[in-house]
Structures are given as structure tokens and as C-alpha cells.
Image (cartoon, rainbow, N blue to C red):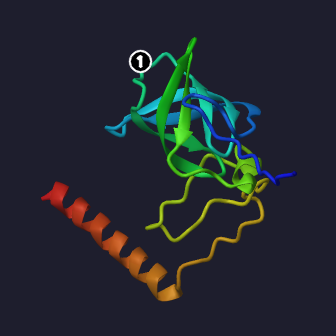
């Protein structure tokens, strides 16, 4: 008699299921108070990363890890090993995010600002800077000239 069976890999406490990709990038870790700390991310997977730091982090401590090209990822500390810590992301990254990580600038555009960062490789030489309308330029010139004469008269009287 034959039986069909399906085996499922179940993660034990402290074991890794996701494949780690070696990286060697400086990053920023923020603790529960939002204080930034410099760390080095040495490996990355969809489920977490390993960071080297001199900080004294506690197992289970909530943190945010800055991953260039991906963003600030809510995480928590799951293990300590030597001079670093294994961190698990609260929400796993996609394979595309792991592949894209550390390939772009660390500059993150704030949503309230209307102008985005420069595209990669752009040194600013081909950016057009528009001129203010003529009425604005004339008004600014007249206003500054009036202010300058006001200062001259204030100091001579």
C-alpha cells in the first residue's frame, strides 16, 4: 500500500529559512526612540539581516533598519552573535526588494516635498533651472533697492 505525502519545512526558533545574500554596506539603525546609529549590514534576506554594531541591543527589541533603495524597515532583534545581531523584518521583503537593496542612493524623498532626488548618474549638468517671471524679478529688484535706501537714510539721520 502506498501513501502520498507532502513535506513542509517548519522553522524552529532561531533557525533561518530564507537564503542570505552577503552584503557589506553601512546603514542606519534607529532604536525605539528614533535615535540613529551607524551599523554595517553584512547579510540580507527576505526575512531579515545581520548587522554589526557596538550597540547593546536586547533580544526582542523593536528597531528600524535603513536599507538603501528599499527604505526604513521595521524589525526586531532575534539573536546576538559576536559583535552583531540577527534582525527579523516585521514584514518580509520581496525577492525584488532584496535584489534591489543597496543599489541606489540612501537619499529618501520626504512625501511633503514636491521635488524628487536626481536620477542615478546625474551630476546636475543637464538640469534646466527656470527663471522667475519678469514681474517677480522687477518687484524683487524694486523692493531690495527701496530697502537699501531705507538703510542708508536710517544711518545718515
**For mark 1, does the 10 Å Cα neighbourhood hold few (<14), some (14 to 19), or many (20 or more) residues?**
few
Number of numbered discs: 1
Which of the 4 image quarters holds residue 44? Answer: top right
Residue at image point 36% right, 71% down: 145
| In this rendering, position of residue 23 left or right of residue 113 | right
**Foreground residue, 90 or 143?**
90
Side of 71 where 127 appears, left or right: right
Q: From what the image shows, is residue 27 above or below residue 6?
A: above
For the point 53% across and 85% down, the residue is 133
| Horizontal side of residue 90 vs 33, given as left or right | right
Q: Quadrant of residue 115?
A: bottom right
Q: Residue furthest bottom?
A: 135
Location of residue 9 in the rendering, given as x and y in whole percent from the top left corner: 70, 42
Which residue is outermost to the top? 82
Out of 148 and 22, give the one closest to the viewer.
Answer: 22
x and y percentages locating residue 134 in the rendered image: 52, 86
User: In the image, 54: left or right of 17?
Assistant: left
Residue at screen point 69% across, 38% down: 17
Amino acid at each position: 500500500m502506498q501513501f502520498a505525502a507532502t513535506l513542509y519545512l517548519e522553522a524552529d526558533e532561531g533557525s533561518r529559512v530564507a537564503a542570505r545574500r552577503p552584503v557589506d554596506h553601512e546603514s542606519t539603525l534607529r532604536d525605539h526612540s528614533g535615535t540613529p546609529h551607524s551599523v554595517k549590514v553584512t547579510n540580507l534576506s527576505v526575512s531579515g539581516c545581520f548587522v554589526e554594531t557596538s550597540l547593546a541591543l536586547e533580544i526582542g527589541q523593536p528597531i528600524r533598519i535603513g536599507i538603501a533603495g528599499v527604505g526604513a524597515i521595521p524589525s526586531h532583534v532575534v539573536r546576538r552573535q559576536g559583535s552583531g545581531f540577527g534582525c527579523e523584518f516585521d514584514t518580509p521583503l520581496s525577492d525584488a526588494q532584496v535584489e534591489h537593496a543597496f543599489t541606489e542612493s540612501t537619499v529618501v524623498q520626504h512625501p511633503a516635498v514636491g521635488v524628487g532626488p536626481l536620477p542615478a548618474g546625474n551630476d546636475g549638468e543637464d538640469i534646466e533651472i527656470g527663471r522667475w517671471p519678469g514681474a517677480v524679478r522687477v518687484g524683487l529688484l524694486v523692493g531690495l533697492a527701496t530697502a537699501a535706501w531705507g538703510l542708508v537714510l536710517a544711518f545718515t539721520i
